[in-house]
Amino acid sequence: MKERKKIPIGIENFKEIIDKNCYFVDKSLMIRDILDSGSKVMLFTRPRRFGKTLNMSMLRYFFENSEQDNSYLFNDLAISNAEDEYLSHCGKYPVISISLKSMKQPTWSGAFAEFKDIVANEFERHFEKGVPDKITGRKMSGIQDFINGTADEQEYFTCLKLFSDCLYEIYGKNIIVLIDEYDVPLENAYFNGFYEQMLNLIRSVFESVLKTNNSLEFAVLTGCLRVFKESIFTGLNNLSVHSVMDNSFSEYFGFTESEVDKLLKYYQFTDKFDELKKWYDGYRFGNTEIYNPWSFVMFVQSEMGGNELSFQPYWSNTSSNSIIHDLISKGNRRIREDIEKLIAGNSIEKTVYEDVTYANMDVKSDYIWSFLLHTGYLKSKRVYMNGVQKYFEAVIPNLEIVTVYENTFRHWFDESIRKTDKSILLEAVLDGDTETFQAEVNRWLQRSIGYHDGYENFYHGFLVGLLEYNDDYLVESNREAGTGRSEIIVKNVVYHNKAIIIEIKSVRGNETLIEKCEDAIRQIDDMQYEFNLRNEGYKEIIKLGIAFKGKQCLVKRG
């Protein structure tokens, strides 16, 4: 049996994938479309881990004039069947290729030092055998200074312009510039307090190499956001932006359904298609349906390894998801109600902001929804105009992202419970004060997200969370009692003098809260939940029936 190709987990170098005979989802026609576009500078914005870096590597190996002929890498790809007018560009250009994704240091000095290393490595890649005799004088010394990391700070603001001028003199050909994850240093600087310094650096580097550069053939940039208001691209009239909302180039980042179908057939996992669709499909770039590529290949690798739990939130586990935590914890009630609708599978309608910046990314601002759209936490189900303003109908893309919202909410809610004084609630339940207990539970219900309506296991966990964190009392959940299992038992473990039995019911259909409370109390008696407690020596046993309906509860004492 022919050995199947390996899944290239974590490999973002195009040449390495082809040379090692790994499975490659062919995106090579992106080369044709870039040449057809005629754009001088192109910016592609997509969520993280949707193939941006791999595509940039592919572009470099196609266009770059290097000592090694790399045209063989494309022999079995779609671009090899394109017309000669496209293939004639293969291996013909000097290429400056840098990635800024590693600029995540917590200080300006650290981040700038990383930028110096990035520049030095790219200069060294081109001049590892020395600087050609064509380059003399200040340009020669400038190259050596950048390689050694000894150039003045101000010189780095135009380093790529010098680089492109030198390469043009050597090759007599316009250069191609590839800048991957251009917005990572801006995001990092914003959250670490040196935003203006980083903004000034990135703006100056880009303006010099992209705006006033006669040696430029074209440039391609990638990132998560389109940051226009910071004026990084000021005066760049030939910039074309391709975001998650555009049809152009929509099929080149992430996996299309036909690519998924082909991959599943190759690895013989077609029986997993329906479940895969629920977990990792649901993105929509322009009019193209897209699967999350990272989660998809991680699933395939897990299945090939024979793991039982292959469906997991792989993509969402690769970052802190702190923006969702901030949205839930710092947002107002209206924001939490919107999240509640989303988790329940409903849509919300929000204004489209293409120029999302880190400066306007406040969780209480409407910009936050566009940020979540561009970064992969929301999907645009529909886009429409109302007057001059553009709006989008937002939904959560898939089950994987639903788990992000749910788990983040649970974490925030548990955190809130631990930090808040619940003495009034605890005293009420221990005294059998149903009125106060009911009021306190209802108050906490208003803070919760009610997408679990009708599910007793949610209300059960919700109540256990509220009742815990008292050293004198033990909260037992689903404990064997009498002839069944009691929902919740709260008992004094110091004096063994008092215990509370709580049975929970949720209201469905035409049922009423009072009816379900009575059902709960009746169950406590019928199933003899107090039997074990009596044997343990508890004299005072309070029986509480609690009925829930959405964000309402009713408490009755038996």
Image: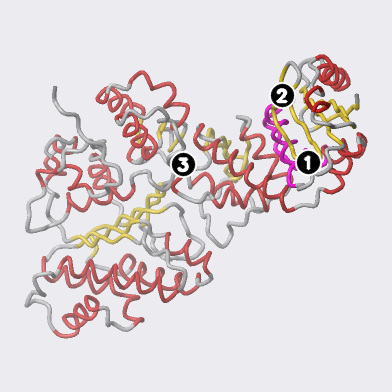
Does residue 271 appear left or right of residue 549 in this picture? left
- Residue 398 percent location from the top left of the image: 50, 32
Label 3 sits on residue: 245
Quick one: quadrant of the C terminus?
top right
Q: Secondary structure at mark 2?
A: loop
- Residue 530 percent location from the top left of the image: 82, 24
Residue 191, compared with residue 148, is above or below; it is above
Does residue 532 appear left or right of residue 249 in this picture? right
Residue type at mark 3 is: Met
C-alpha gap between disc 2 and disc 1: 33 Å
Quick one: quadrant of the N terminus?
top left
Residue 445 highlighted magenta (yes or no) = yes
Q: Looking at the image, can residue 156 be seen?
A: yes
Q: Residues within 10 Å of mark 1 (few under 14, many from 20)?
A: some
Label 2 sits on residue: 454
- Residue 456 percent location from the top left of the image: 71, 25
Foreground residue among 551 and 467: 467
- Residue 148 percent location from the top left of the image: 23, 78
Residue at x 41% of width, y 65% of height: 235
Q: Secondary structure at mark 1?
A: loop
Q: Magenta: predominant secondary structure element?
A: helix
Q: Residues within 10 Å of mark 2 (few under 14, many from 20)?
A: some
Range of residues picked out in magenta: 442-469
Residue at x 14% of width, y 41% of height: 74
Label 1 sits on residue: 493
Residue type at mark 1 is: Val
Do the residues under discs 2 and 3 have CB atoms within 8 angstroms? Answer: no
Q: Tell me the mark number nearer the camera, choosing from 2 and 1.
A: 1
Residue 160, compared with residue 82, is above or below; it is below
Foreground residue among 445 and 436: 436
Please tell me which of labels 2 and 1 falls first in the chain.
2
